[in-house]
């Protein structure tokens, strides 16, 4: 239930903090006093989008905070999934709207996304405004009503999971067939490409190695000449570097015997001598290995021509890409060769998933059909109590040809307010007052079948008379025994039925207008209901009438 609401700098509200009680409460106030502002603020902590125009003029941000007691509802899994601290007795939703256009949302002081806030808000409060009466005309809403009364929540979840899996498999089968059809149209070309790439026998890194070897062969004589020159400069018998180093090393070794500071020279010269001697030998070996081979050159040029041709043909730039393409074509051909088996396997899977979804759809249909008779009778009795004694109502469940995300049923509410008038869809014939009464009865039935912490009715009494309003108030009071119910109303008959009474009013000064919400004392409540009965001038008769309504 909603325990308290705090609003700061929202629209015409400076600061407002109010506690709410269990059971049935009413909110009254003159037209334009700000009841819609209270609901607008409340909708923000339920995840609705915000407008910076909602911030009170001259302020940098507004804050709306609602405290809930959700101890009777299992929200721990939701909190654990979202990483939110869980305290069922004090569950706080907060929304901050900044003048910069930014918005922040929190659950128990943990930052959350607007999507998370909306998901949770839907589990905490149901705000039923006048425009929601139009939902009664929506076949999807009618389906939701029947499923709620039939207790189909878990079964519907199972069905929707099975239906998604069936549609996914069906889509995969369709895509496979289309792919196979397209591949078979290209099969001859694919096999031609495959054969050319297969015969090429490409290897990773081959192109780079061949291009390097080609460069060597094209400059073989220059390379050989340069290597021999390096060897000569290093190891010439007369003035080669190695020869000179050897002589320097011998001199340093002799010198170190009489001059100990020469020991370091000898060691360094020996290291340089060994390195350069090894290098000279290596250069000589490389020079001997370099040979101009016209046959090898022709092979490399031919091989590279083939690689370049394949790259140009397939619009790629490396051998690795050609190898990857070869593997892809091989896989396509394997799929073509094994397409019958793949299709058969997937067809079997689609058939199995279809059967599973269809069986669950039949179970849904059975439960929906099973409760329709009792649903019709109970609703007729409730609506008759609200001043429509000759009402007739039918919940018509028919089978669809194809399954959809909600099963294989079509549900249609048929209605007649008069004994001899034919049943017709609710959308075609129900008046505004009749729709209000139907919705109130449906909500009361759903409240008894599902766990909904709080429901707020925003002027659901529109278009009904005083006697019927009295009975509507009693209906709300009755299902307020099971849950928290708040009604925003202009009718004293409904206001008198509330366990707690709140009033919305405006105050003015020289510079601003401010909206307030307060809980009325017993005396204030008597005066408010008398005012609702008689208008601005409260009469003794209105006071007495209000006392009769309140039973005092």
Image (cartoon, grey):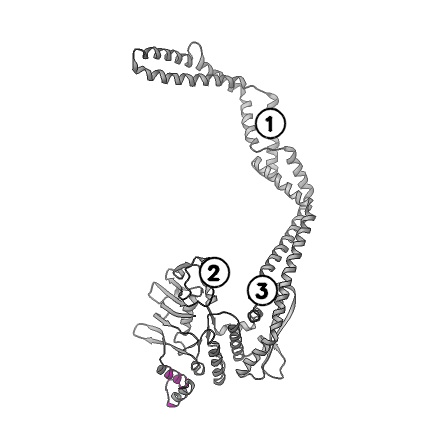
Q: Which class describes the residues within 10 Å of circle 1: few (<14), some (14-19), or many (20+)?
A: some
Residue 14 within the magenta-colored segment of the rendering:
no
User: CB atoms at circles 3 and 2 under 8 Å apart?
Assistant: no
Please tell me whether mark 1 or mark 2 is closer to you in this view: 2
Residue 528 within the magenta-colored segment of the rendering:
yes
Q: Determine the residue positioned at 34% across, 10% down.
A: 254
Quarter residue 454 falls in: bottom left
Q: Is residue 439 above or below residue 200?
A: below
Q: Determine the residue positioned at 46% across, 14% down.
A: 232
The residue wearing badge 2 is 77
The residue wearing badge 1 is 301
Q: In 3D space, how far apart are the residues under numbered discs 1 and 2 (Cα atoms)?
A: 69 Å
Q: Secondary structure at mark 1?
A: helix
Label located before the other in sequence (1 or 2)? 2
Query: Taking the image as drawn, is residue 153 in sight?
Result: yes
Q: Determine the residue positioned at 48% across, 63% down.
A: 119
Q: Is residue 143 above or below residue 393?
A: above
Label located before the other in sequence (3 or 2)? 2
Q: In 3D space, how far apart are the residues under numbered discs 3 and 1 (Cα atoms)?
A: 71 Å
Query: Percent position (x, y) of residue 150?
Result: 57, 70
Label located before the other in sequence (3 or 1)? 3
Q: In 3D space, how far apart are the residues under numbered discs 3 and 2 (Cα atoms)?
A: 20 Å
Query: Percent position (x, y) of residue 354?
Result: 65, 59
Q: Secondary structure at mark 2?
A: helix
Query: Percent position (x, y) of residue 350?
Result: 65, 56
- Range covered by the magenta-colored residues: 525-540
Query: What number is the disc on residue 155?
Result: 3
């Amino acid at each position: 239930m909603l325990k308290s609401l705090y609003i700061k700098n929202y629209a015409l509200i400076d600061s407002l903090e109010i506690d709410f009680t269990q059971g049935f409460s009413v909110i009254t106030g003159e037209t334009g006093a700000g009841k819609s502002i209270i609901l607008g603020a409340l909708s923000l902590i339920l995840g609705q989008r915000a407008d910076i125009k909602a911030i009170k003029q001259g302020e940098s941000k507004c804050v709306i905070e609602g405290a809930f007691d959700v101890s009777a509802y299992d929200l721990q899994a939701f909190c654990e999934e979202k990483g939110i601290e869980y305290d069922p007795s004090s569950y706080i939703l907060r929304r901050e709207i900044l003048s910069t256009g930014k918005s922040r949302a929190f659950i128990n002081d943990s930052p959350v996304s607007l999507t998370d806030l909306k998901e949770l808000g839907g589990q905490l409060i149901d705000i039923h405004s006048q425009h929601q009466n139009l939902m009664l005309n929506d076949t999807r809403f009618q389906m939701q009503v029947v499923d709620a009364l039939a207790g189909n929540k878990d079964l519907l979840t199972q069905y929707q999971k099975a239906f998604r899996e069936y549609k996914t498999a069906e889509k995969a089968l369709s895509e496979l067939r289309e792919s196979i059809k397209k591949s078979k149209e290209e099969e001859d070309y694919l096999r031609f490409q495959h054969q050319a790439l297969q015969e090429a026998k490409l290897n990773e890194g081959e192109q780079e190695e061949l291009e390097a070897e080609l460069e060597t062969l094209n400059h073989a004589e220059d390379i050989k000449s340069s290597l021999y020159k390096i060897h000569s400069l290093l190891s010439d018998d007369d003035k080669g570097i190695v020869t000179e180093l050897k002589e320097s090393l011998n001199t340093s070794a002799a010198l170190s015997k009489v001059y100990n500071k020469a020991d370091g020279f000898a060691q360094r010269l020996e290291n340089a001598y060994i390195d350069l001697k090894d290098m000279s030998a290596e250069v000589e070996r490389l020079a001997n290995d370099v040979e101009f081979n016209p046959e090898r050159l022709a092979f490399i040029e031919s091989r590279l021509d083939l690689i370049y041709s394949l790259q140009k043909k397939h619009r790629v730039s490396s051998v690795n890409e050609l190898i990857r393409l070869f593997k892809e074509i091989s896989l396509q051909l394997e799929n073509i060769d094994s397409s019958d088996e793949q299709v058969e396997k997937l067809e079997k899977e689609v058939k199995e998933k279809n059967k599973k979804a269809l069986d669950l759809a039949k179970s849904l249909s059975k439960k929906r059909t099973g409760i329709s008779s009792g649903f019709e009778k109970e609703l007729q009795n409730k609506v008759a109590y609200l001043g429509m004694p000759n009402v007739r109502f039918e919940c018509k469940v028919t089978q669809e040809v194809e399954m959809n995300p909600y099963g294989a049923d079509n549900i249609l509410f048929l209605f007649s307010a008069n004994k001899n008038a034919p049943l017709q869809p609710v959308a075609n014939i129900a008046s505004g007052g009749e729709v209000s009464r139907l919705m109130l009865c449906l909500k009361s039935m759903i409240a008894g079948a599902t766990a909904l912490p709080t429901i707020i009715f925003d002027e659901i009494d529109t278009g009904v008379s005083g006697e019927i309003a009295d009975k509507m108030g009693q209906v709300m009071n009755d299902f307020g025994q099971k849950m928290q119910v708040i009604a925003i109303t202009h009718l004293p008959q409904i206001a008198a039925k509330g366990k707690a009474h709140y009033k919305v009013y405006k105050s003015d000064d020289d510079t601003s207008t401010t909206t307030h919400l307060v809980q009325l004392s017993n005396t204030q409540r008597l005066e408010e209901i008398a005012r609702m009965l008689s208008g601005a001038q409260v009469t003794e008769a209105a006071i007495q009438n209000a006392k009769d309504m309140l039973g005092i």
